[in-house]
Amino acid sequence: MTWPPTRPPSRRWSGPPGPTRPRWPGSPPAEVRRQVVLLLTSGLGALERREDPGGRDFAEARRLGADRAAQGVSVAGLLCGVQAGRDRAVELVVRHGRAAGIPDEVLLEGLLTIGRYAAAVERAVVDGHRAAERDLARTGAPARARLLRRLLLGGPAGDQTAELARFGLRPDGRYHCLVAEQPDPVRAHALHRQFSGCGGVLGTVEDRLAGLTPRLPAAAPADLLVVVAPRQPLARAPAMYTLCLAALRTAAHRRLRGLRLVTDLAVPTALAAQPALAELLRGALLGGLDPADEFHRELATTALAWLDHGQRLDQTAAALHVHPNTVRYRLRRLRELTGGPPVEEGARCPVPDTVRWWWALRTWLDPR
């Protein structure tokens, strides 16, 4: 028999990824998925053509190793992911091969081929990782990353004057804390170069591009989310980093992109930190609405737009592309169902009531 065996047409050679699916730490999921797909496709091609895996080009595996080195992932941690993937592949081959009635000797032949391929992948991954480590060491990137992680994560302080000066920071300086969604490694490198023009220190911290910079970047890629805090003393860097992470999660949930200031995201970030209170407010103010009723959702969407546009009927109507009378009607119907907010001509919700209704409406329309 040859490998791989012909599969019966009534069976699918599949195995939905389960909870044990390997994921390399410090990796954007889409990039990991792309690299794993390429490695698996290459491996399946080698099996089908019964090639010697040692003779194949493992450029993608070397790139995977280099990418993880740039993200601060150790070679041991990286190999854990590779070996978990190999173990998962072996498990699926044995399970589905036996279910398909493939003889054990054929399965053994295939497993031996998988083992040779996996060993070649491991060697290429380690080669890429070590080559990238040598390049990073020449540029001082590991020392820069260690300093940045210590400053942002509140590590041991001591006298850091000389180390700060090495990377252009001053103990008495004030710096913007910057955190970005992690793009694929190629774009991350380009983004690092772009933001490095503002001075300061940038690197990968907890799977994200982060940094401390004396000046705001002029812009960020339109399809990438970057959150920046106002300039603060270095001693406040851990607190600013924590706020940036919270604001980044809030902005990502709202599908925002581009350069965003923490201060502009203050209200939704603060409210997002209180999900239990949001749920209580949602039930207390909007209990008369049915989430499955499209008309009720239309009423809530209109009310939220009305609050977002300064409680102005004309601006709300323009934003929703309807007549102001339609907005007025929907707000009155919402008031009949829920008891608020007021919609009389010239009436305005006090600030506390505006926040309560805005928070309840947003939570009702977009529950997490």
Image: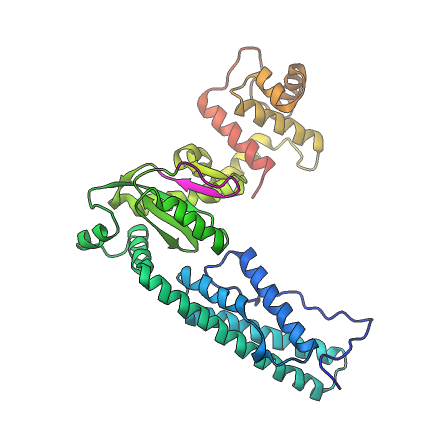
Considering the image in quadrants, where does the N terminus appear? bottom right
Q: Residue at point 71% right, 81% down?
A: 3
> Is 196 placed left or right of 80 in the picture?
left
Q: Camera-side residue: 192 or 78?
A: 192
Where is residue 77, by image quadrant?
bottom left
Considering the image in quadrants, where does the C terminus appear? top right
Q: Note whether residue 74 is visible.
A: no
Q: Is residue 312 magenta?
A: no
Q: Camera-side residue: 105 or 129?
A: 129
Residue 143 rendering spot, x and y as whole percentages? 29, 59
> Is 313 placed left or right of 349 in the picture?
right
Residue 25 rendering spot, x and y as whole percentages? 47, 62
Where is residue 326, by image quadrant?
top right
Give the residues in magenta.
Answer: 218-229
Residue 62 rendering spot, x and y as whole percentages? 49, 68
* Dominant SS type (magenta): loop
Task: Establish if 40 lies above or below 284.
Answer: below
Task: Establish if 368 lies above or below 336.
Answer: below
Q: Is residue 219 magenta?
A: yes
